[in-house]
Image (cartoon, rainbow, N blue to C red):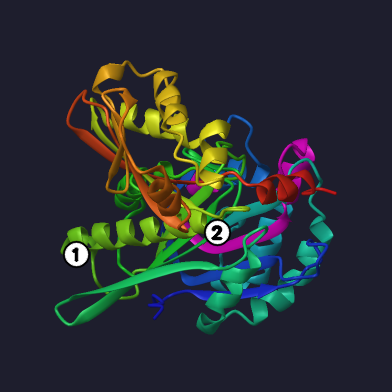
Amino acid sequence: MIHLPRGFLFSACAAGLKASGKPDLAFVLAPEGASAAAVFTRNQVVAAPVTLGREHLRASHGKIHALIVNAGNANCATGAQGIKAAKTVCRAVASEISKIKARPQQVFPSSTGIIGVPLPVEKVTTALPGLIAVASPEAFIAFATAIMTTDTKAKIASEEFEFKGRKAGIVGVAKGAGMIHPNMATMLVYLFTDIEASPRDLQKILKDAVDQSFNNISIDGDTSTNDTVLLLASGKSNVQLKQVRKQFEGALRNVCRSLAQQIIADGEGVKHVVTLRIEQARSMEEARRIAGTIATSPLVKTAWAGADPNWGRILAAIGRSGVKVNPTKINIYLGNQQICKNGAAAKFDASKAHEYMSQPAYDIRIALGSGKTSLEFLSCDLTTEYVRINADYST
């Protein structure tokens, strides 16, 4: 069951940006406005909508009336023309919703798709009147579908909580299947809630939730140019954040983790989802660096694709992670079997290990023997299908 928060209207349409002719333009309206917080990519090459989105959050003091998302074109590496295109779209949206007196700076833009191709602005602006006219709470699924690119399914998660008989909810939607790596990924995530909160409070809570979810996943090690996680709070539940802070923090964290898991499970060409459990690290930073190095090693990931319990590749990745370790204290477990003991081979049943790794999802536990910090990090295998998808992506 999807718990849709009050205060938001959704819509989607096909504007002709995708060659497939599928829906590629999505819209959200908060008629009475919403407090906003966002986390963006740390890639130094950023798309025009990321640059403009940051500017609009500052200019509006975190008060947003509308979200416009296009798929099929990243509007990245498009120079001054790209910024102009994003501004044109935001002005056009503001004009269409002029009845609620929204300024262009209260429109938040997002894009996803091919890098380096100019955004066909006229296709977007032509589609806007019809797109906005049909916005309704019932079109949430259509919104979730329209933002997809190489995704095979919509990614949705929601939770509901209560305070003195008043219910409040949060729902999240994500797109992402490739270019997925911490800081974050070719990932767009939109979170909607009807609690009442300030942009400043939302920002801190969102950052913490992202650190415990989207920054602990990797498909291919590539950090994208368009990554955005946007949280909007309409306040329509009449429940204040200070009244339900712990409940809200837990619900937001759960929704983000669910979306992160769905992104990995729907990764391009993915056959196996692997949960890396890093234990006995000195710090979270070191645990994440080790997990990320393992998760982005082509040798490790191709071994996972072949269900090959090649623990030596994992050990080698740990050793080159840049984190100081004592190899003689490292132990690696595949399910309930230990496959590496104190940095050397352990006696294990290779056929059972292969059978275990042939499952769609499994765990690898790594005890570093260095400290007391633990981390759970989601990743996947690297298959020939991933190569095919990305070899043909723009042609």
Taking 353 as reference, is 164 above or below it? below
Q: Per the image, is 62 magenta?
A: yes
Q: Mark yes or no: residue 144 visible.
A: yes
Cβ atoms at labels 1 and 2 below 8 Å apart: no
Left or right, 317 with respect to 383, comes to: left
Whichever of labels 1 and 2 marks the residue nearer the N terminus, that label is 1
Q: Residue at x 60, y 79 (%)?
A: 135
Q: Amino acid at mark 2?
A: Asp
Taking 100 as reference, is 255 above or below it? above
Q: Which residues are magenta?
A: 56-85
Residue on which disc 1 sits: 244
Q: Per the image, is 143 magenta?
A: no
- Outermost residue, left side: 164
Q: Nearer the viewer, mark 1 or mark 2?
A: 2
Residue 82 placement (x, y as % from top left) = 75, 43
Q: Residues within 10 Å of mark 2 (few under 14, many from 20)?
A: many
Q: Amino acid at mark 1?
A: Val
Residue 338 picture quarter: top left
Q: Which mark is residue 319?
A: none
Q: Nearer the viewer, residue 325 or 194?
A: 325
Q: Nearer the viewer, residue 265 or 147?
A: 265
Secondary structure at badge 1 equals: helix
Residue on which disc 2 sits: 266
Q: Residue at x 55, y 72 (%)?
A: 100
CA distance for labels 1 and 2: 33 Å
Taking 251 as reference, is 357 above or below it? above
Secondary structure at badge 2 equals: loop
The N terminus, quarter of image: bottom left
